[in-house]
Image (cartoon, rainbow, N blue to C red):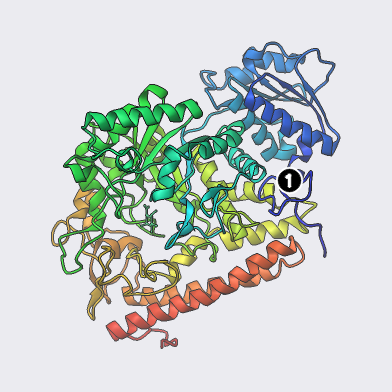
Amino acid sequence: MSVPVAGRASADSGESDWHAAWLPPAAFRELGSRPVLVHGDGLLVDTVLDEVSRACARYGGQLWHGPPWQVDADLVLALREAGPVPNAAAEAARLGATPAVNGTGDGALGDEGYLLTRASGVTVVLADAPAGLLYGMFHVVRLGAAAFDDDLPARRHRPALNRRMLDHWDNVAVHPVSGQIERGYAGGSLFWRDGAARHEPARLRDYGRLLAACGVNAICVNNVNVHDTEALLLTDRLGDVADIAEVLRPYGIRVHLSVTFAAPVVLGGLPTADPLDERVRAWWAAATRRVYQRIPDFGGYLVKADSEGQPGPFAYGRDHADGANLLAGALAPHGGVVRWRAFVYDHRQDWRDRSTDRARAAHDHFAPLDGQFADNVIVQVKFGPIDFQPREPVSPVLAAMPSTRLAVEVQATQEYTGQQRHVCYLAPWWSEVLRFRPRGAAGRTIADVAGAGGGLVAVANVGDDPFWTGHPLAQANLYAFGRLAWDPLLDPGAILDEWIDLTWLPGTTGDPEAVRRTMHAIMDDSLRTYERYTAPLGVGFMVRPGHHYGPDVDGYEYTQWGTYHFADRDGVGVDRTRATGTGFTGQYPPPWSEVYESRERCPDELLLFFHHVPYRHVLHSGRTVIQHIYDTHFAGVEEVAAMRERWRLLAGAVDPAVHDRVAERLDEQFRSAVEWRDQINTYFFRKSGIPDAHGRRIH
Ligand code: GCV
């Protein structure tokens, strides 16, 4: 069967070089084919008007904005404060006089919330602020025809997390080692190219639109490793940042900047960057004032300090609270925040020294500082204690700083999860982390911690690739990140359905149900498939040093980076117990301090993260560790083979360009999975001398 090619981004011109991702024009069919009334004013309301008018022009609907009206609308999108709307049902909802509204809690909608209801045949979106109207409109688009069902439940929608941010690790100048984007797998940067700003507002606007449609409201435009050219974004090149902010503002996205802690020295010519030095304070205050003069809604600074070679307060005998509070002081008068990363560890470790444990580092550095950070400091914590591995325990820092605003950082860019050559739907993993309760069943979830503090952050996975994320299916991670940041309780499978519905639309997709089934079959468990053929039982790494793609079991074993597995002929794993190991388990509150300490109680999937065990140790699953390694690695490869076959059957049902790209990546995933399987199985067979119980071929 043949189908039309999926919609292009700037479909009006039809000339753009990139694909539409979610929200091709057809996603607006239901909304665009009706009489729509928009009431209210403001920059983001203009965005709503623009979206609705383009949809109506395409699909035959009509748009009214502001009185006088002559309209019998199917859809009303209104700011409550804008005054009466010419539709009795909508007006009753606006005044809160209908049970629909009264039944939705205290009625407050906040800066980004909205009420979505259906009354007397009219779908109504009400908001108290323009951003709410924009999010409400995208909700209507997401629902499609269901938004106009008479049984649409009345509900107030507000984000659980106020800060929903993407950190770009983009460099302005191409870095000799990390390139245009550090850990970027989707081509060049959307913002920068070869040392200069790209100034390509059309693509940037499309990006802002995609982000707003899934709920992201903040980005950081440059790498946390701030090199010489990028340092200048704070001063000489501030205009480039202002231009980006200008394009993204209509989509409710606030721009942030990574800055170097050494800025007063490298940019200001001061002899010191000591946070307690008055000249340093004055320099930051003046620099920040200039930023807000150019970008009044600037979000704030992101700082990686005293980490992997970046400068920080340690050079002056100060701590991280001193450093963060310095910048917080400069930002406070303007309402900005400093996001101070807790990813601080000794990257010049000696592998012979068993007392140093990279997993301990963030807690060792930050937990004692709880309560010492200014109100506008957000300590940004990687979700796990090591580094975005496909399996790690949740970072104990997230339970250790009740008096500090904390943000949780995840990685959409697939540095350790197949680099956008492997299918890896990350939402189930993020969801598991967000639902984790570090103090046990009665305590708060990680989502609660993020909600009370600095929100959720992902390292971005986009670039200038025509499919945005290199692997077209990796778009789902970007989409799911925004949705989980808005509502961490959403089901990852349901989010995937949303993404499918908004991306693979009937009309551009043959046999939509087959497409949906295939996507789920390939993606739902794809992260765990990846885990099966890579490092076993939470031990992590085993990737090739430097670029981190493909297997190299001992690649990091004798390096300075602190990521070891300690495999020998008798066993494998890192002893992080209090009894005999590094004591890391003691950084957790009960019950986890006890669960992780105990070899018997520790969950199988984290066993080698916490314990060094013999190969014949029997897991809860009933298998020995060595047999688990063999079985999962054989199974992982078979699962990839099945994915590849499933995708092959979709040929003709989806855009051929997308089909080809995914097929080509699945070929590479299969090759890589075989390589992983063979290297891991052979390595452990040679170390242990224990054969596979099923007699399969191990080299
Ligand atoms: C931006 C890991 C990555 C680095 C990254 C660092 C960080 O170590 O490999 O590329 O640097 O994390 O999060 O700062």
Q: Name the residue rendered at 31%, 27% in the picture.
A: 329
The quarter in which the C terminus is drawn is: bottom left
Question: Could you tell me the amino acid type at mark 1?
Answer: Ser
Nearest the viewer among 44 and 437 is 44
Nearest the viewer among 79 and 258 is 258
User: What percent of the width, then of the height, locates residue 309?
Assistant: 29, 54
User: What percent of the width, then of the height, locates residue 171?
Assistant: 47, 52
The quarter in which the N terminus is drawn is: bottom right
- In the figure, is residue 276 to the left or right of 670? left
Q: Which residue appears farthest toward the left when viewing the image?
A: 579
User: What percent of the width, then of the height, locates residue 347?
Assistant: 26, 59
- Count of labels in the image: 1
Q: Name the residue rendered at 40%, 44% in the picture.
A: 231
Task: Say which residue label 1 marks.
Answer: 10
Residue count near mark 1 (Cα–Cα under 10 Å), binned few <14, some 14–19, many ≥20: some
- In the figure, is residue 250 to the left or right of 635? right
Q: Name the residue rendered at 71%, 48% in the picture.
A: 9
Q: Secondary structure at mark 1?
A: loop
Nearest the viewer among 54 and 330 is 330
Q: Quadrant of ligand 1?
A: bottom left
User: What percent of the width, then of the height, locates residue 75?
Assistant: 75, 26
Say if residue 321 shows up in the picture: yes
Where 515 falls versus 398 (above or below)?
Answer: below
